[in-house]
Amino acid sequence: MEQFNKSQETHLWYTEYHTPNSGITLKVKETLLRVKSPYQELVILDTYEYGKMMLLDGLVMLTERDEFIYHEMITHMPVNVNPNIKKALIIGGGDCGTLRELSKYPFIENIKMVEIDEEVVKASKKYFPQLTSGLSKNSEIIIGDGIDFVEKTNEIFDLIIIDSTDPIGPAEGLFTDAFYSNCRRILSENGMMVLQAESPYFHADSIKIFSDRLKRIFGFITPYIAFIPTYPSGMWEFIICTKKELDTSLKSKSLIGDFEQMLKYYNHDVHSGAFKLPTFVKKIYGI
Ligand code: AG3
């Protein structure tokens, strides 16, 4: 093993605390951006290990090196369960990573993304062009409040993706009864809503609260997991919410065919594996 160089201690490091006593610490090359938007503080750091990293209010949203896991898993899992998606809605997701993944399916006729914070979209275009290029011509980025949007719209969607931050600060309202009820109202009969649902390791109590809420409002919830190195505990939860019981099997093997080589995490084995939950996670859901 290489000798540890003590002089590295003088470099800058960034820590996101996951609990009062643990967190993730990354050595920083450079601070590229630091802005206070009307909603949150947005920081972009260049790190040695994970490349460029976006922080919102101090929480890691994505890094250049591992963003593919989150964005592939929040998108390809639901689409491959039910490929009959014509209209999709993304709430949040201002970095455009989820929109990039959804754009890979030419049969999706219309994608709307509603992001509250224009600064996030602007910063992503500048610092993460790999997230914002190749977006579908059928997509539309709306700068606005997702809570408001789902309350007022009468459009019906086949897929709603909630690509939010943690349930504190501006995203708090995206975990409420009122918001979920409106999402259900604008979901087609066989439609799916999928949300990022925090870490089953560190956030079991809050997952229990909002998953009970989702089950009561939608009828059916189907959780799955992925491994994201830069998020708290590395183990991350997603939940698909439906009005009918969900058959999680792969519907068409050819769906990711054309762009399979471009994907780095999602594949057909992962598809079925991700729905298999460890015992402590099953317990959160009482299954
Ligand atoms: N949204 C989920 C990020 C949650 C991370 N939480 C944390 N670091 N404490 C990611 C947005 C990517 N489009």
Image (cartoon, helix red, strand yellow):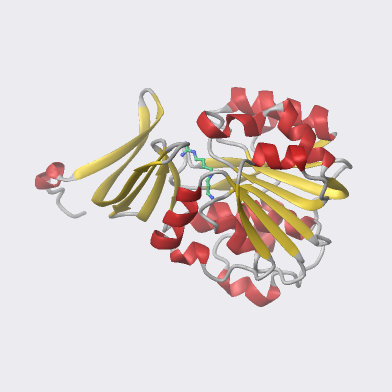
Against 286, is 35 above or below? below
Where residue 235 sits in the image (x, y, percent)?
A: 53, 41
Looking at the image, residue 132 sits to the left or right of residue 195; the answer is left
Where residue 263 sits in the image (x, y, percent)?
A: 58, 67
Name the residue furthest bottom.
258
Where residue 45 sits in the image (x, y, percent)?
A: 31, 50
Looking at the image, residue 144 sits to the left or right of residue 43; the answer is right
Residue drawn where x is 65% and y is 66% of the image: 103
Can residue 54 be seen here? The reply is yes
Looking at the image, residue 64 sits to the left or right of residue 159; the answer is left
Against 187, is 46 above or below? below
Residue drawn where x is 72% and y is 33% of the image: 179
Against 207, is 40 above or below? below
Quadrant of the image occupied by residue 153: top right
Residue drawn where x is 78% and y is 58% of the image: 87
Residue in front for this viewpoint, 75 or 189: 189
Where residue 29 sits in the image (x, y, percent)?
A: 23, 53
Residue in front for this viewpoint, 251 or 142: 142
Against 195, is 68 above or below? below
